[in-house]
Image (cartoon, rainbow, N blue to C red):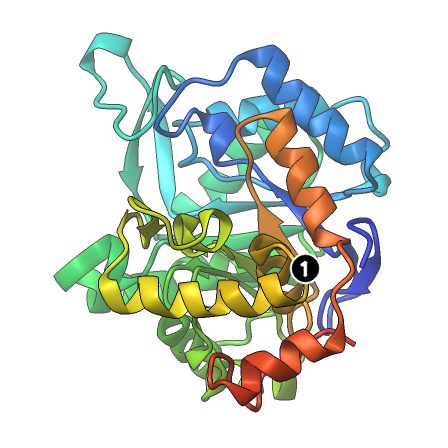
Amino acid sequence: MKPGTLRKFGRVDLDVTAFAFGTAPVGNIFAEIGEATSDAMFQGSWDAGVRFYDTAPMYGHGLSELRTGQSLRWKKRDDFVLSSKVGRLLRPAKRETINFAPWVNAAPFTMEFDYSYDGTMRSVEDSLQRMALERMDIVFIHDIDVFTRGKDQPEVFKQAMDGCFRALERLRDEKVVKAIGVGVNEWEVCHEALKQRDFDCFLLAGRYTLLEQDALNEFLPLCEARGAAVLVGGGFNSGILATGAKPGAKYNYAPAPAHIMDKVARIEAVCAAHNVPLPAAALQFVVAHPAVPSFCAGTRTVAQLEQNLAWFSHPIPAALWADLKSQGLLRQDAPVPE
């Protein structure tokens, strides 16, 4: 599939490209990326046909949104789809007073969680100001999962359903935004949100991949039934499906445990037998599900971007998917590319 292939975004009157550009890295996560490199990745993705861009106030304490706006500002607004997030408010502060970790040399704003109705309205307005763009198409409620909020998650989830959702529902009703959703690291949280409220979409990071398909149990079938679209991020499980099972490989942002290393090594062997790079299979598998119109990937260099784009369209024989299933490395009910 070509990165610029247009696909319908669930039940919403919106078409998105199958490849989406994720902007967390240009927020300087873990290491600094220069302005020229950031802009070159935006322009390189655009030249490759990508027209879906995802950002968030969290990424670089606003730096990602600033760079997203700078790189897209003079494109025709109707030519691309833009998503950002709510749940954090940014306030200006002296750099020396801010703990930026894990961001490096980020924008001079502190962050605080705010899932209230008023906080959500302000967050949307602030994001538009930072980007200097007239609208966002999609807004996700960000990080209301156990991974981020720990023991406070049940209360945070309730706050978001009572506050953020009401605000976003109003913005959707008034046609300020086209789609509203939840962006988290756990499919169970997405599933509960869809059961409770009328969401259009989700951004699910790392929980529907070539390595993990538990989301097929309940969440993805409900998305299909309700016409909810799922933008999948973290398709490499934070590293190991890109690097392979080599020493130091990362899984969920930590060293991969032995059983994960073993399974990935077996998947790698099947890919090698068909002359297919493991990352190509990982990227293309995700968008085969009918509820997943697009895969979101962030990159640190132009070379990484170009490599991802090449993997996304690398030819893969049907026999590879059949072999993965026959060896018990892929669920039998997992949709695969044609």
Q: Is residue 196 left or right of residue 97?
A: right
Which residue: 56% across, 63% down? Answer: 169
Residue 276 or 66: which is nearer the viewer? 276
Q: Position of residue 252 (x, y in %)?
A: 32, 54
Name the quadrant containing residue 179.
bottom right
Question: Residue at left 74%, top 24%?
Answer: 73
Residue 94 in view here: no
Query: Vertically, is 282 above or below 306?
Result: below
- Vertical relation: 2 (above or below) 57: below
Relative to 145, residue 335 above or below: below
Placement of the N terminus among the 4 image quadrants: bottom right
User: Relative to 266, is 155 on the left or the right?
Assistant: left
Q: Viewer-proximal residue, 87 or 189?
A: 189
Percent across and percent down for residue 57 are: 45, 35
Give the labeled residue for mark 1: 275
Q: What amino acid type is highlighted by mark number 1?
A: Asn
Residue occupying image coordinates x 66% and y 59%: 276
- How packed is label 1: few (under 14 Cα within 10 Å), some, or many (20 or more)? few
Q: Which of the 4 quarters of the picture holds residue 288? A: bottom right
Percent coordinates x, y for residue 199 in the rendering = 55, 71
Q: Answer whether residue 87 is visible to the viewer in this image.
A: yes
- State the image coordinates of residue 238 (x, y, percent, origin top left): 40, 50
